[in-house]
Image (cartoon, helix red, strand yellow):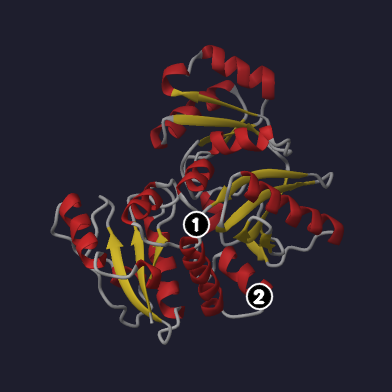
């Protein structure tokens, strides 16, 4: 039986989404194949002691009180796993956004020498920082929105003028490294731009300013690595919002899901191949969700790559993977665990 340690929560704005992902993983992991141990990470980054999953539908019941310092709690986790066989153990870092998708937890697990599912340190860090991934897309000649960025120290009138002259309104402003569309705003004039950049800089030390691409955002699940990559059919949220912001994703009841998203078959095939190329360019492995803009003139623009997308019952990644495999979520989890162990043993 394989020992699985499910790390979840974390100090990011997507903490609660990680709880939902952890609950869905726990309910669907094959108990005959895996010995599941859960480790909750609170918003301060402290690790709980490992605990067994008890059947529940309440993700907040997975939250544990932690009465140790961060260093002591992490030491407890190391003591917990130090005697385990890495060849028969795998970590699932169900931590979205900061700490989980930026390479932090991956680097920690690399140092410990234990296999884990999903992307490694470098690809996680690249995709988390939207400026860095945009630079890579640009170097590879991928179509994307025009963009500029600024640090707080370089944010001045000259930068505002560059945004206006080199890109032009309307614009999208976002933190370079943050998740779930938090701190993202559409702006139509200089005053709004200044305000939006200041807000974005609350979440990250770098603000990204992009051209507004008018079109439908589509999401494609990509699984595998190198030349053995599966790209699923696309899915999309249909919304009246100008762009898919946090409110449109999670609160607007008029937002409609379309899975799979209906598009011209030739364009769909191009989108799936495009998703693969973007995934490979960023060095991704394991799995990710690639978000693409499909414009009214049928062009494809890369938006971003999420290296540990939501694993909740409503998340597109899980449902697209199930659709492609024509299997249940338990089977999808088997595939990504087998992939994580294989990549570790191939090192």
Query: Dot 2 surroundings within 10 Å: few (below 14), some, or many (20 or more)?
Result: some
Residue at the spot 31% in from the left edge and 56% down from the top edge: 112
Look at the image and tell me whether residue 217 can be seen. Answer: no
Q: Quadrant of residue 1?
A: bottom left
The span from disc 1 to disc 2 (Cα, nearest Å) is 19 Å
Between 174 and 88, the residue placed more toward the observer is: 88
Position of residue 210 in the picture relative to residue 64 (left or right): right
Q: Position of residue 67 (x, y in %)?
A: 13, 59
Q: Position of residue 317 (x, y in %)?
A: 58, 64
Q: What residue did someone put label 1 on? A: 308
Position of residue 206 in the picture relative to residue 289 (left or right): left
Residue at the spot 48% in from the left edge and 57% down from the top edge: 347
Q: Position of residue 194 (x, y in %)?
A: 50, 23
Q: What residue did someone put label 2 on? A: 325
Q: Is residue 156 above or below residue 249?
A: above
User: Callout 1: helix, strand or loop?
Assistant: loop
């Amino acid at each position: 039986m394989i020992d699985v340690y499910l790390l979840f929560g974390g100090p990011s704005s997507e903490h609660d989404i990680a709880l939902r992902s952890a609950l869905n993983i726990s309910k669907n992991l094959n108990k005959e194949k895996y010995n599941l141990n859960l480790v909750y990470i609170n918003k301060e980054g402290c690790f709980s002691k490992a605990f067994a999953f008890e059947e529940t539908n309440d993700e907040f019941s997975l939250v544990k009180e932690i009465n140790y310092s961060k260093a002591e709690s992490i030491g407890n986790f190391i003591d917990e796993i130090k005697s385990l066989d890495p060849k028969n153990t795998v970590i699932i870092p169900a931590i979205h956004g900061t700490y989980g998708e930026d390479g932090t937890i991956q680097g920690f697990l690399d140092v410990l020498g234990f296999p884990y599912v999903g992307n490694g340190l470098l690809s996680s860090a690249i995709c988390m920082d939207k400026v860095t991934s945009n630079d890579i897309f640009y170097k590879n000649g991928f179509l994307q929105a025009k963009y500029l960025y600024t640090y707080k120290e370089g944010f001045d009138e000259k930068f505002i003028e560059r945004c206006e002259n080199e890109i032009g309104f309307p614009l999208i402003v976002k933190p370079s490294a943050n998740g779930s569309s938090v701190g993202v705003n559409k702006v139509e004039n200089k005053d709004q731009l200044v305000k939006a950049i200041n807000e974005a800089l609350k979440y990250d030390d770098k603000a990204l300013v992009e051209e507004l691409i008018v079109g439908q955002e589509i999401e494609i699940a990509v699984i595998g690595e190198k030349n053995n990559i599966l790209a699923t059919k696309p899915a999309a949220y249909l919304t009246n919002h100008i762009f898919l912001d946090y409110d449109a994703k999670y609160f607007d009841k008029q937002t409609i899901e379309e899975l799979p998203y209906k598009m011209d078959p030739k364009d769909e095939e191009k989108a799936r191949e495009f998703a693969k190329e973007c995934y490979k360019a960023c060095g991704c492995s394991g799995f990710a969700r690639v978000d693409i803009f499909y414009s009214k003139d049928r062009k494809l623009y890369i938006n971003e790559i999420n290296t540990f997308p939501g694993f909740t019952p409503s998340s597109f990644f899980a449902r697209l993977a199930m659709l492609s495999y024509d299997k249940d979520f338990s089977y999808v989890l088997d595939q990504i665990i087998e992939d994580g162990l294989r990549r570790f043993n191939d090192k």
